[in-house]
Image (spheres, rainbow, N blue to C red):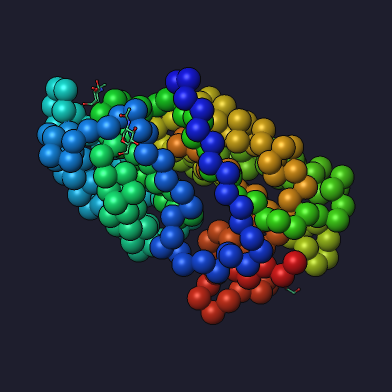
Amino acid sequence: MSLIYKILLLLALCSCNADAADPLGNFCNLNTNISRVSQISVNIDRLLAELVSKTSSNGYIATSFGRGDDQVFGLAQCRGDVSSTDCSSCIQDAAKLIRQRCPKQADSRIWYDYCFLRYNNKSFAGEVDTSVGIFYFNVGTVTDPENFNKQLGALMDEIRARAVEPKNEGLGKGDTKLSSLVTLYALVQCTRDLSQIDCAQCLAIAVGNFETICSNRKGCRVLYSSCYVRYELYPFFYPLDSNSTVADNGRAIVYP
Ligand SMILES: *[C@@H]1O[C@H](CO)[C@@H](O)[C@H](O)[C@H]1NC(C)=O
Ligand SMILES: *[C@@H]1O[C@H](CO)[C@@H](O)[C@H](O)[C@H]1NC(C)=O
Ligand SMILES: *[C@@H]1O[C@H](CO)[C@@H](O)[C@H](O)[C@H]1NC(C)=O
């Protein structure tokens, strides 16, 4: 795919308290316009209903709806650490909003922190797709980049290795103490349609942004259609680290 779409978004300090229902981004491929009354469009609605009803039972589904030229393919996946209740509400929000954001595009994708959903009239399962990237980073930078990057690299290597173990279904997460007061938390995840080697490739591309876009940032997220990578200096994945400062609603607060 020769299309290179990059959406750069800035995460300001403490926008971490933003509504969980807000998407991190979406992508409507304007080269795949279809009419709202086409059979493809009708099939997309049927496909979305299936994604909504079936994703939360094990956090992932890749399926299709319709036949021949009107067949549409869909994939929905939640972050592996979120509950099925949170997964279900995330996919419901995603299915609703994607049709508003991309009303007439056959190739559409939407990213949330807790889930990802996409569909297309072209099959995409099993293909590494890093053509569209969403990047969020903390505006603050670390005070000791040398040690930070060393520890971040080591933690990433560890959780990337975990993500490609079949039993982990594409998910790797972990933390490491940088000092007595500061802990680094990181999570990586591939979509479950990828083979181990393709998962490793997607994560390597995502982590490749650490030296550029994420350079010395206190936190950074890279979201592709095939994988997700995030690190923060506060706990953001479940189960939450009980010794950290956490707001009543369960979301972490960043203290710069
Ligand atoms: C698809 O639709 C969008 C918005 O309706 C429009 O801006 C775009 O030019 C269209 N793309 C093509 C290839 O016609
Ligand atoms: C997807 O739909 C568009 C618009 O109808 C069509 O031009 C294109 O050939 C379709 N692609 C596939 C793989 O069927
Ligand atoms: C929380 O802090 C206590 C006391 O410092 C320690 O014993 C415990 O292991 C910590 N728990 C976690 C989950 O880090």
Spot occupied by residue 179 in the image (x, y as percentages of width and height): 83, 61
Spot occupied by residue 103 in the image (x, y as percentages of width and height): 26, 44
Does residue 151 appear in the picture of this structure?
no
Q: Which residue is drawn at 50% across and 33% down?
A: 5
Give the position of the N terminus as an image quadrant: top left
Image: 57 above or below 117: below
Q: Residue at x 70, y 44 (%)?
A: 214
Image: 95 above or below 213: below
Query: Between residues 200 and 136, which one lies in front from this camera angle?
Result: 136
Spot occupied by residue 210 in the image (x, y as percentages of width and height): 70, 39
Left or right: where 199 falls relative to 208: left
Q: Residue at x 75, y 43 (%)?
A: 215
Spot occupied by residue 94 in the image (x, y as percentages of width and height): 34, 53
Left or right: where 18 falls relative to 41: right
Q: What is the quadrant of residue 212 in the picture? A: top right
Left or right: where 16 falls relative to 88: right
The quarter of the picture showing ligand 2: top left
Does residue 41 appear in the picture of this structure?
yes
